[in-house]
Image (tube, rainbow, N blue to C red):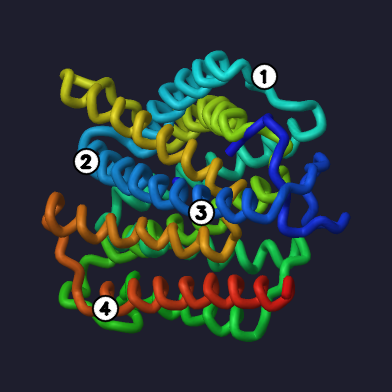
Amino acid sequence: MSNREPQGSATINIHTNESSPLLPKPQSLQPDHKRREIIGLGYMTLSALGFSTMSLCVKLSGTSFPSFEIVFARSIIQTILSILGCAILKINPFGQPGVRKWLLFRGFVGTLGLCLFFYSITQLPLADATVVFFLGPAFTAILASIALGEPFSLFDGICALSCMIGVVLVSKPQFIFGGETPTDDTTEWKRLFAVFCALLGAMMSAVAYVTVRKIGRGAHFMVHVVYFGLVSIVISPIGMFLFQNPVMPQDSGEYGMLLLVGLTAFIGQCFLNQGLQMAPAGPGTLMRMNDVVFAFLFGIFILHEYPDIYSISGASIIVLMTSAMGIHKIYSHQKTNR
């Protein structure tokens, strides 16, 4: 809203420091490494399509089901499929002992981020919720500099600050922009709360991404999906009964929509976790831009949600600044390795 057991392929940084994966990895030849990165970027693009389709299904399901129930349905389907995948690939679904605590942590923060994102989708236009959640890469860059020792320059800081300006344009708070219906204060605060949830969800996704990078190839991507699903199955019912009222599906159409949420999420999750372990952070960020593109297309042509000039401007700023950060990281990495 990333696991793999087979060890292989090299990492960019071969020094032993905070950014090194928990389990050692052998070095590979440069041509193989380059090919691996290109495949990883393709996986990231496919993950964007999978997650955007999932978001569309969540938006359509949100008219019938509360957000935590949608998360719960997704988690059940995701867990079943991932365990079957592990069985087919002959992979231990619980991973290696040295990384299990990190896998649990990744599943926990990923689940929180997912619950927050799903709620924002049900309350906001699809494109707006996706754009705010897309701040995840900016938060990832900041967190990676703190937790993994990756560089974070003044340029990156300016881009991150500009992204926050983009969020303000997308959220359009009435105390800044005014409003045509000043009496509807409840609706305004509810909308701003949904924006805040999307923002917090983006922060949680950043923590999850950095954890995946930390684990590296210490766990098969399917194992990440298993942990994510299992943790979600535990957490989402708690939120569903504490904060919302569960609703039973009434017909095959509603069951089918929940099934699609789980299937598209599973596909997106597999491609994302695989891509995160194969693609460099900078180019991978650029590929995730497709989330926003797909969200706007789905919103306009399927949901008939037409963004105003503020949303378009804010989305453009966020996409451009996030892209600039990614390109800057690519350039900096190439310069360092010359």
* Residue 4 visible, this angle: yes
Amino acid type at mark 2: Leu
Mark 3 or 1: the one toward you: 3
Say what secondary structure mark 4 lies in.
Answer: helix
Q: Nearer the viewer, residue 80 or 197?
A: 80
Q: Position of residue 234 (x, y in %)?
A: 55, 26
User: In the picture shown, does residue 216 fall above or below 194?
Assistant: above
Mark 3 or 1, nearer chain start? 3
Residue located at (52% from left, 58% from top): 284
From the viewer's perspective, is residue 319 above or below residue 197? below
Report the quarter where the C terminus lies. Answer: bottom right
In front of the other: 291 or 91: 91
The picture places residue 49, in percent across and down from the top left corner, at 33, 47
Of the two numbered discs 1 and 2 in the rendering, the one whose residue sits closer to the viewer: 1
Q: Which residue is mark 2?
A: 60
Which residue is painted at 64% across and 20% down in the image? 91
* Residue at mark 3 to residue at mark 1: CA–CA distance: 28 Å
Q: Is mark 3 in CB contact (under 8 Å) with mark 1?
A: no
Task: Assess whether mark 2 and mark 1 are in contact (beta carbons under 8 angstroms).
Answer: no
Mark 2 packing: few (<14 Cα in 10 Å), some, or many (20+)? some
Name the residue carrying label 1.
92
Residue 310 is labelled as: 4
Mark 3 burial class by Cα count in 10 Å: few <14, some 14-19, many 20+: some
Q: Which residue is mark 3?
A: 38
Decide which of tag 4 and tag 2 comes sooner along the chain.
Answer: 2
